[in-house]
Image (cartoon, rainbow, N blue to C red):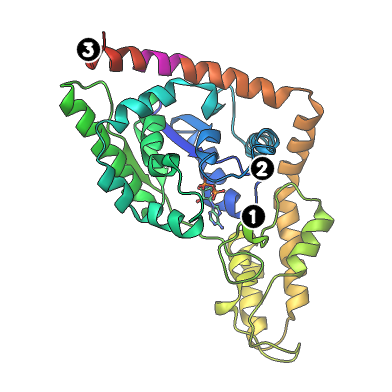
Amino acid sequence: MTKKGRVFSGARPTGRQHLGNYLGAIRNYVALQAEYDCVYCIVDVHALTTVETTQDLKLNTFEMALDWLAAGIRPDESILFVQSHVPEVMELHTYLSMVTQLGKLTDLPTFKEKIRQQPENINYGLVGYPVLMTADIVLYKSDVVPVGIDQAPHIEFAREIVRSFNYRYDTKALIEPQVKHTEVLKVIGIDGKDKMSKSLNNHIELASTPEETIKRVREMVTDPARQRRTDPGNPDVCNVFTMHKIMSPQVEVDMINTECRIAGIGCVDCKLRFATNLNKHLEPFRAKRAELVSQESYVQDVLHDGGQRARAIAQKTMIEVREAMQLP
Ligand code: ADP
């Protein structure tokens, strides 16, 4: 079947993935494979702008790749690779940086947020983060980038850089990527407050055992106004109910929606039902993960092969880029 074009997406190596990563990104990556030629990149170079030590970088990259593969990324069809395995991206980043205005980079809300988050480490790489991201996208001649509406300005920025480059060197060597809007599903953590995230330790790991999952789900914060089992609850403000709506069969969702409001079902029972459904949903993932772990060096082989395939595309693009720039 001919595919609609090439998709590119990258994520920093954050190690074992959580339910937020799965519902907000990985699930979509898996689905896109049916229609697009997909290039998925673990952006270890980008990670260097924020990590204090590289001690865990290898393990985090490995664990993340393992989770993506277990979730359904098909390495024979898609390219799964590590950013630093294709050093051409660093070269393209340098060339693109010459057609990018510094003021625009320092004005970006994401850069300003980083200044707030790590005032003691405002490194040069942080400023150039969007330029490196653009280099990633265009190096592989990607047509579309799947992002939620909140991230669309980043892709618009990438398009601007591409237009500046193509205009400056009177070329069509680089392709302006299109945004592929995806439904933004923001998964709230077990604290019931913030976005699920590893750094806040409010996450549920996909690779955890069914018992660990139950334990984590039991810690989930429900409707804070419901103090006692006999108090009626409000599912509209309860994160457990939100998760039921994503994971559980409709009949169960309807039952909880009715029974919670009249104190017919308690929070403990409601959470256990969610944990059961979640564990059921994750069964194939966990089985596949265990199988992949048992195949020695499988993940490394996939990443190595992906890197080579990505590099072959990158090298062709760079020939065109250097030619367009009339580099001696
Ligand atoms: P990065 O900063 O490289 O995007 P993250 O680990 O923050 O790395 O996120 C990886 C992917 O998972 C992103 O697409 C992000 O939107 C998605 N994601 C992370 N946490 C959540 C969440 N709580 N809800 C929905 N999507 C999430």
Is 106 displayed left or right of 194 in the figure? Answer: left
Element on which disc 3 rests: loop
**Quarter of the image with the C terminus in it:** top left
N-terminal of the pair, mark 1 or mark 2, is: 2
**Which residue appears at 42% of the width and 33% of the height?**
7
Q: Any atom of ligand 1 within 8 Å of the CB at mark 1?
A: yes
As shown in the figure, which amino acid type bears the numbered disc 1? Lys
- Characterize the local packing of mark 2: few (<14), some (14-19) or many (20 or more) Cα atoms within 10 angstroms: some
C-alpha gap between disc 3 and disc 2 = 41 Å
Residues at circles 1 and 2 in contact by the CB criterion of under 8 Å = yes
Kind of residue indicated by mark 3: Gln
Amino acid type assigned to the residue bearing label 2 in the image: Gly
Query: To which residue does mark 2 refer?
Result: 15
Q: Closer to the observer: label 3 or label 1?
A: 3
- Point out residue 130 in the picture as x, y percentages from the top left corner: 37, 41
Question: Label 1 belongs to which residue?
Answer: 198
Left or right position of 45 against 115: right
Is residue 317 something that shows in the picture? yes
Q: Estimate the x, y position of residue 306 in percent, counting from the top left.
A: 56, 21
Disc 3 versus disc 1: distance between alpha carbons? Answer: 46 Å
- How many C-alpha atoms fall within 10 Å of the one at disc 3: few (<14), some, or many (≥20)? few
Residue at left offset 60%, top offset 83%: 234
The residue located at (45%, 44%) in the rendering is 123
Q: Which residue is mark 3?
A: 326
Q: Is residue 303 above or below residue 42?
A: above
Give residue 240's position: percent from left, percent from top.
65, 70
Q: Which residues are magenta?
A: 312-317
Q: In the depicted view, which residue is nearer to us: 1 or 88?
A: 88
